[in-house]
Amino acid sequence: MQVFGLVGNPVGHSLSPPMHEAAYTELDLDARYVTFEPAEGDLDRAFEGADALGIAGLNVTIPFKQRALELVEPDSLASRIGAVNTVDFSGDTVTGHNTDAVGAVRALEHHDVALDGTAVVVGAGGAGRAVAFGLADEGMGVRIANRTETKAHALAEEVPDATGHGLDALPEVLADADVLVNCTSVGMAHDDDPEPDETPVPSSALHADLAVLDAVYTPLETRLLRDAAAAGATTVDGAWMLLFQGVEAFELWTGRNAPVDAMNAALRSGL
């Protein structure tokens, strides 16, 4: 039996286990997906133990994505992003990858969004970095908008064909854009506000020629996506990005085409 899993802290509410287990069931694979929650300073020992125990692969989530980069042989994309969210123990060398970038790309492609022209990425944190590099690698020009404008400029200096902007520039940079991806947590439900009505993007800046992906998936229908739909834009909820980063990890580990429909059904049943 092969063992895969997720390492993070906390991981109790992760939707990765049912998503991956559904894939194993669908393809009749002798595999299991489990969660691990080491203390924040113990990732080194966790990876050593995983390798020694024959664990085949691990997903990595907060707060370990940056530290994981230092413990594995990262691929080019993970190195540029500066974070690892998928580790493969199967070869002679433990390798690190970042499937967040591909998750966004495949989510948009699944909805027949052409990845040419210009993309606006809102947010310059971990998710914003991954998505900006992923879309740039597809050949898109990338405009990065962030609350702290200096962070947007700093990221834009690393990403090919990218520019940095403050949030106040969104109406201008979205006017002729083709894709918008929200990589901030604005609009995400939490204990203090289970039904948020917030968006990082003015509704007046949205238009029918946009495809809008919101990385937030709780709730699935954010205010940004409602505003985008009202403007006639193509909308893609955040669960698709979560799904396809998992699909990419599954295919990396197993060399098999992932059963996307089964994984999607399991993921959405947990939301």
Image (spheres, rainbow, N blue to C red):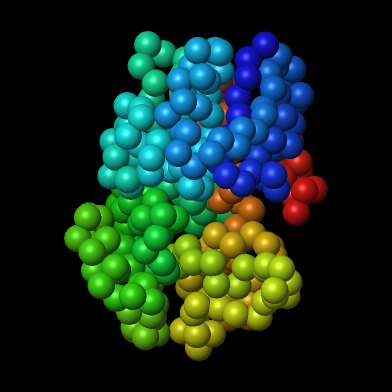
Spot the residue most to the bottom: 204
Q: Residue at x 33, y 47 (%)?
A: 81
Q: Is residue 78 left or right of residue 54?
A: left
Q: Which quadrant of the figure contains the N terminus? A: top right
Give the vertical position of 126 relative to 262 (above or below).
below
Instruction: Give the image quarter of residue 149.
Output: bottom left
Query: Residue 99: x, y in percent?
Result: 46, 40
Q: Is there any visible trace of residue 95 in the rendered image?
A: yes
Q: Residue at x 28, y 36 (%)?
A: 76
Q: Is residue 11 left or right of residue 127?
A: right
Q: Is there any visible trace of residue 99 in the rendered image?
A: no
Give the vertical position of 26 relative to 41 (above or below).
above
State the residue in front, 251 or 109.
251
Number of numbered discs overlaid on the protein picture: 0
Give the vertical position of 46 relative to 31 (above or below).
below
Q: Residue at x 42, y 29 (%)?
A: 44
Instruction: Give the image quarter of residue 73.
Output: top left
Spot the residue most to the right: 269
Q: Which quadrant of the figure contains the C terminus? A: bottom right
State the residue in front, 116 or 172.
172
Give the vertical position of 140 relative to 198 (above or below).
above
